[in-house]
Amino acid sequence: MLLQVEDLHVTYDTVYGTLNALNGVNLSIEEGETVALVGESGSGKSTLGLSIVRLLPPNGRYSKGSIVLNGKNVVSLSGSEVRRMRGTDVFMVFQDPLNTLNPVKRVSTQVLEALAVRAKKENKAFDQREGISEAIEKFKDVRLPDPEVLIHRYPHQLSGGQIQRVVIAIGLLLKPKLFIADEPTSALDVTIQAQVLKLLNSLKSEYKMSVIFITHDISVAYVIADRFAVLYGGEVSEIGEVSKVVKSPLHPYTKALIESIPKRSRKEGELVAIPGSPPNMLSPPTGCKFHPRCPYVMDVCRTENPPYTEADERTLRCWLYERPPT
Amino acid sequence: MAGFVAFLIRRVANAFVTIVLMIFLVFILVHVVAPTPIDMAKLVSPNPRASMQDLENIARDHGFYEPIYIQFVHYVEQVLTGNLGTDLQQGVPEVDLIAQYLPISFEMVLAGSILAVLVGLYTGAVSASNRGGATDYAVKGLYLVTWAAPIFVVAVIVQLVFAFWLKLLPASGIANPLLATPTRVTGFPLLDGIIAGDWAYSWSVVQHMILPALTLGLASFGVVTRLTRATMVDALDKDYVKLAYMKGLPKRKVVYGTALRNAMIPIVTLIALIFGTAVGGAVVIEELFNYRGLGYFAVASVYNLNYVAILAITIVLGISVIVANFIADVLYGVIDPRVRLS
Amino acid sequence: MENEVPLSGQSGWRFTVRFLVHDRAALAGLVIIGLFLGWGLVEGVMQYIASYTHVASWGWKLLPSDPISLSLKNSLAAPTLSNLNNLFGANYEGQSVLSQLLYATPHDATASVLVVASAIAIGMMIGIPAGYIGGWTDEILMRITDAFLAFPYLVLAIAFSVLLGEGFTTVLLALVLIWWPTYARYFRAQAISLKNRNFVEASKLSGVGPLKIMLRHIFPNSIDPVIAQATLDFGSVILLYSTLAFLGIGLELNYPEWGSMSSLGVSYFPASWWLVLVPGATIMVIVVAFSLIGDRLQDLVAGRLTY
Ligand SMILES: Nc1ncnc2c1ncn2[C@@H]1O[C@H](COP(=O)(O)OP(=O)(O)OP(=O)(O)O)[C@@H](O)[C@H]1O
Ligand SMILES: [Mg+2]
């Protein structure tokens, strides 16, 4: 087991009080496995990624639970241990490509910084020229055009998609065991999206890398992932094999999500929006957080949050699948 | 590169136009106050009780009967060729007096401003990278109090503590008056002392400079802290900072190498402004520390109704602000490739 | 990402006040400023009555003592808790420091409010057209602004009050001249960033004239960051105003100023420390109060809401 997140609670301090962004997330990932993390905006996907790499914003706090990555509990690591973990054990590509590269430094400098850290961790001498040629190779892998020229540019001379791929390349150069990609393809156009996805897929088998793939887009997740985790209101409402979850969703929220994908065969397929709005995380609904929007709502849903249940080879939280109390 | 040259040329042109405009404003100000040629003559007449006949002669000599635009062209010409008039009290060219007083102030405010900038950058960065922590609140309290304290209170307290209680440093003057002044080469007291190899004098200059410079530094570092903290907080939230952490860089490198470098872009303008306005802002300090530089001269000129001197000082200090802004613009381009390369 | 969800639909006055009150430091600032401006208004009215009725004593009806006439018995009395009149001590002429402080408040309150308000008004009239119209208009207006910005503020203020004659109004005028260019720059930057927004484009397309767009759209949308800056500047104006008074600029007969009170006290320092330090501390407290609010408002404007 490479990663084991157990009962993770993360809160943000805000002017309005405490916001519970994650409420008891359980998630485990094997080596070489890809898990897609899907859910509406605000469901806590980025928060989960950031907590795994210990980069929560200053007002974010781990209030409960543990994250064991490669045998170490991330939550309680010291500063220098965190530094050793970042880059080698885990790497995360952030959501917004516009600001992910430092605008005042050349791309080459920023790539070399990463390589220098890697060399130091491996106790190897670091040679700039070798670093550059290694970087150029990796740039070719992520299909960056003219890598020899592009590497000497400044970020503002690159497009959003190019920046995104430079960051992915930096991540790959570091050869992390776990690669977290927060909507890595949202800034890319469709053909490049497909290329990057293919690339991630081939690299993950080549390097035996595990991947957490955060996305809104269920069809993308379907292509790339082995397992599927659905996040709602800071909780994992359903997690299981991709084929299982997508073909026969059990949780009413997952069902609604899957129905909302426009069917490619139906040209005028209308997008079914999920009725209601996402929960307000400052004062979430009592009981199951999905109950105000759930078509199958029962009395118990309004008062009590369902526990984790195993059903049909997956884990989910829903009273519908809970064995009636004896 | 060509882009950068064009950028430079544009900035030089801007600075030049601004200087001419500023001289124009001074010109207007003077003419509003002294609308007739005789009024103008009164302003520049060394003798406050000059007869009408004398005043008319003075007005004719200075060309005050010429059409106004010709007067303006003359005025600009004179200022730009370094003729700022003749001092009413001392009868020597104003330029010479300024050349005498400016270096004295310059040395002291340079020391004070460097202190302010270094302390400001450091405290701002530390406070931003420990946002919400005890250090952050301590820094905030410190800069708020020093910034909000009127400069005369800071000066008086500094004098009391360091000069009268601890008796560490002298409270007034530029150097020990008992020491002979070395021959004037550059006009900068410290530099001249060093050139002459007169260590006793140089040491005395340094000692006398410390308290006024400290006061200036104390009173102005808060502005730098405040802006540095704000821009650093914003920079530290950016994804490129997270990426730097992600690569495994140590915190020190991320804060100073990545975030501060970006945060510096707006701070450079402020720093230039601090240096540009420091001499003008040091008036109170020079007054209280009896530090006879340009600020002291300015206040003395005001009390003596020495209009020629006041105008000359205004123009010289104005030009120094414009030049400082020009330097800031250029530095902006150097730090930020987006400015330089677009 | 961070401020989307919790903030949606929350803005305007009520939110701003709630946001300020939530922060204990800003709340303290609000209270101090409320007292300062409130007292400034009350005492200002009293002084107006005094000058209107020619009965000078109206001016100190609410004060512990007459802040202007001599009372040599009380000369250099030290601060004491047992006598309200000498709470902050007395000066060489025996006048109560407390009475003088309170008596001088209207000038500082007026200066801060009037100077900042006029600077904003001028800055808006120069900055918004410069940013919105652009091109040569911008070039010319900005060069003028830069030229004003280059004036050495202290020297200009001094020169001004000498050339135009001493007095409160002259100093105010000089301060406005020093201050407006900063606001012109803020408004210009705002106008530039706003002019290509959809709602402006939309009104342009539907034939609304430039003047109306500037008044209806650009101005209301650019005022928030300006207000945050202005709050800080109220304090800065008071600092500069008292520095001028300290140098003896802009003083009026029989009107103590916080700066000039300090300045007169320097000769009795440190033995009679209260003469310098009490007015100095008063200025400091008020400036700090303004900046506590200003800092918080700036956080609000910059979207640094959560921490
Ligand atoms: N710095 C922060 N301070 C306060 N609240 C925050 C902060 N960052 C995120 N949140 C809140 O935490 C919740 C989870 O946010 P998160 O960014 O993890 O969602 P997400 O699933 O990544 O959404 P998206 O798809 O829009 O990226 C949201 O309600 C969000 O408003
Ligand atoms: Mg996200």
Image (cartoon, coloured by chain):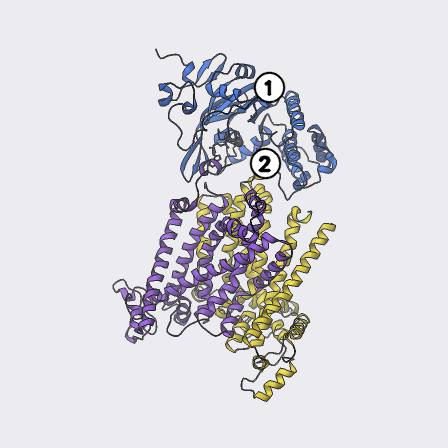
Q: How many angstroms separate mark 1 from mark 2 (CA)? A: 41 Å
Q: Based on the displayed image, in which of its 4 quarters is residue B80 positioned? A: bottom right
- Residue B67 lies, in percent from the top left, at 65, 76
* Amino acid carrying mark 2 in the image: Leu
Q: Is residue B309 visible?
A: yes
Chain holding disc 1: A
SS label for mark 1: loop
- Colour for chain A in the figure: blue
SS label for mark 2: helix
Q: Is residue A29 visible?
A: no
Chain holding disc 2: B
Taking depth in this image into account, of B124 and A125 the one nearest to the observer is: B124
- Residue B53 lies, in percent from the top left, at 59, 89
- Residue A206 lies, in percent from the top left, at 66, 21
C112 in relation to B231, above or below? below
The residue that mark 1 highlights is A266
The residue that mark 2 highlights is B243
Q: How many marks?
A: 2
The residue at the point 51 percent across, 61 percent down is: C179
B167 in relation to C16, above or below? below
User: Which chain did the renderer colour yellow?
Assistant: B
- Colour for chain C in the figure: purple
| Residues packed near mark 2 inside 10 Å, few (<14), some (14 to 19) or many (20 plus) | many
